[in-house]
Image: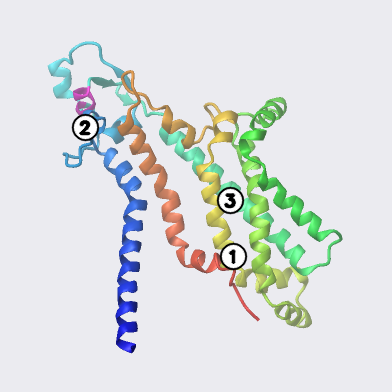
Amino acid sequence: MAAVETSRERILGRAAIVAVVAATIIFLLPIYWIGSTAVKPKDVAISVPPTVFFKPEITPFVRLFVKRVQSNKAVDPEQYAAAPWWERDIMDGGEAVLKTGKDVQFSAYPNRFMNSLIVAVVSTVLAVGLGTFTAYGFSRFKIAGEDDLLFFILSTRMLPPIVVAIPMFLMYRAVGLNDSHLGLIILYVAFNLSFSVWLMKGFMDEIPKEYEEAALVDGYTRMQAFFKIVLPEAVTGIAATAVFCFITAWNEYAFALMLTNRRAQTAPPFIPSQLGSGLPDWTSIAAGTVLFLLPVAIFTFLLRNHLLRGVTFGAIRK
């Protein structure tokens, strides 16, 4: 009987491994497809049936980072020979790099990428910071109508962003925050704050109050006890909250599309606007998407240990 149970457990274990491997492959397939499209030639990227084996090239990244115009005539052989290698790659595709004198004009993608970085980082720091202080107050002090206040804070997360996009656009235009970094930062902080408060309150509740009481007996002020005792113990929760807030701000599309145009536009609404000769340049779009994935992937990887602990709400137990 024991042998039968052991055999059954072995079969179930192998089946579980196969299921996990299969699920991993399915989830990674879109990432592989985007990554492979980012290094495909234009004609290969739109071929039917899809081409699996091909000679990779970096031309899509070159097209992503430089301004270019369509060439209506054959490229001059002398001009082609004198051009740098990256410009010759684009010329082979029937396009020419747009220049001002000897300086290459970069596309708007680096600026849009930097806008995303500024807005996401600043809004994440503010949302996590304000959420940490607010959660500490709800966790440690008796507040009249606490449950109602917490529900009100959470209710701001229930409203789909697209519902308030037009009213926000009208209000932002009236106060001059349209197409500005500050406008997006304020909006992202407002939407991430409810999530930050609720998540951080779970961590604060699990940090024993006795730690602070001992610090207060030793002569610490309440603020000193918070920064020297509570905050170090809440690092796991802060890291997990920061990851989720950063991902939300980094990927946000609706507000960035409607409230920005040029100066403060972020990468999500800019990437789909990459056009080729009458058709979307899928290779440049894929190249922009791959580069856009890197910061959030690196940030999540660096905080992976805190994230795994954070999703269990198990910072400290009495």
Q: Secondary structure at mark 1?
A: helix
Numbered badge on residue 124 = 3
Location of mark 2 (residue): 44
Residue occupying image coordinates x 64% and y 54%: 195
The picture quadrant where one finds residue 104 is top left
Residue found at the very far top of the displayed protein: 73
| Residue 217: x %, y % from top left | 78, 82
Mark 2: amino acid: Val
Mark 3 to mark 2 CA distance (whole Å): 40 Å
* Quadrant, the N terminus: bottom left
267 is within the stretch colored magenta: no
In this view, the residue in front, 286 or 298, is 286
Residue at image point 60% right, 32% down: 180
Disc 3 marks which amino acid? Answer: Thr
Q: Position of residue 89 (x, y in %)?
A: 20, 29
Residue at 22 percent across and 34 percent down: it is 49
In the rendered view, would you say 1 is above or below 13?
A: below
Where on the picture, by quarter, is residue 68? top left
Circle 1 is placed at which residue position?
A: 237
- Give the residue drawn at x 64%, y 51%: 126
User: Along the line of sight, which residue is nearer the eye, 13 or 160?
Assistant: 13
Range drawn in magenta? 88-93
Tag 1: residue type?
Answer: Gly
Nearer-N-terminus badge (3/2): 2
Distance, label 3 to label 1, CA atoms, is: 14 Å
**In this rendering, the label closer to the viewer, 1 or 2:** 2
